[in-house]
Amino acid sequence: MRFLRAIFFLAVLVIVGVLGYNYWSGLGWTLRAPSVPKDFDAGAAQQRGAELTKEAARQAGEAATKLEGAVSEGTLTAKIKSKMALDDYVKARTINVDTSGTVVTLTGLVESTAERERAVRLARETAGVTRVVDKLEVKKP
C-alpha cells in the first residue's frame, strides 16, 4: 500500500512540476492568451469570414432545395403507388412509377387497356402532378 502511495505521490509531483515549468517558460499549456502575429490583418480576416459564411449559406440553401425536391418527388411516387395498391382494378406491383419534379412516368405491363387507363387516371388525379407520361404496355392475349 505504501508503494502505491509513493508512486501516486511521485506522479502528482511530476505533473505539477511539468505544468509549473510550462507555465513559467511559456512552452506548453498556459493561462495566457496566444500571441497574435504582427502582420495579422483583422479586417481582412473578418471579410474572409463573411465571404465564407455567405458561401456556406448559399450552398446550404441549394442543398435544402434539392432535398425538398427529392422528398416531394418521393412523396408523389408514394401517393400514386398507394392509390394503385388500394385500387381494385390496377395491379400496382406490375407498374413502375418514376417521378421527376411534377412529371410522372408510368412503365410496366398491364392486363388490359381499362387497367392502363385507370392507372393513368389515378396518377393524373394525384395532387402535385402536372403531367403523366404513359409508357405502359398491354399484355398480348
Image (cartoon, rainbow, N blue to C red):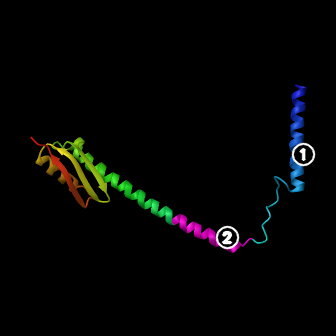
**Quadrant of image for the C terminus:** top left
Name the spot of residue 19 as percent of width and height, x first: 86, 48
Chief secondary structure of the magenta span?
A: helix
Q: Residue furthest left?
A: 141
- Left or right: 116, with 126 as reference point: left
- Displayed quadrant of residue 99: bottom left
Q: Earlier in the sequence, mark 2 or mark 1?
A: 1
Q: Could you tell me which residue is drawn at 20 percent across and 54 percent down?
A: 134
Q: Residue furthest front?
A: 140
Front-most of residues 75 and 132:
132
Q: Mark 2 falls on what kind of element?
A: helix
Residue range corresponding to the magenta coloring: 40-57
Residue type at mark 2? Ala
Residue type at mark 1? Gly
Front-most of residues 93 and 30:
93
Residue 45 disc label: 2
Taking 83 as reference, is 55 above or below it? below
**Quadrant of image for the N terminus:** top right
Q: Could you tell me which residue is drawn at 82 percent across and 56 percent down?
A: 31
Name the spot of residue 90 as percent of width and height, x first: 18, 44
Name the spot of residue 104 as percent of width and height, x first: 26, 55
- Left or right: 124, with 70 as reference point: left
Q: Nearer the viewer, mark 2 or mark 1?
A: 2
Residue 17 disc label: 1
Real-space CA distance between mark 2 and mark 1, rounded to the nearest whole angstrom = 38 Å
Q: Could you tell me which residue is drawn at 58 percent across and 67 percent down?
A: 52
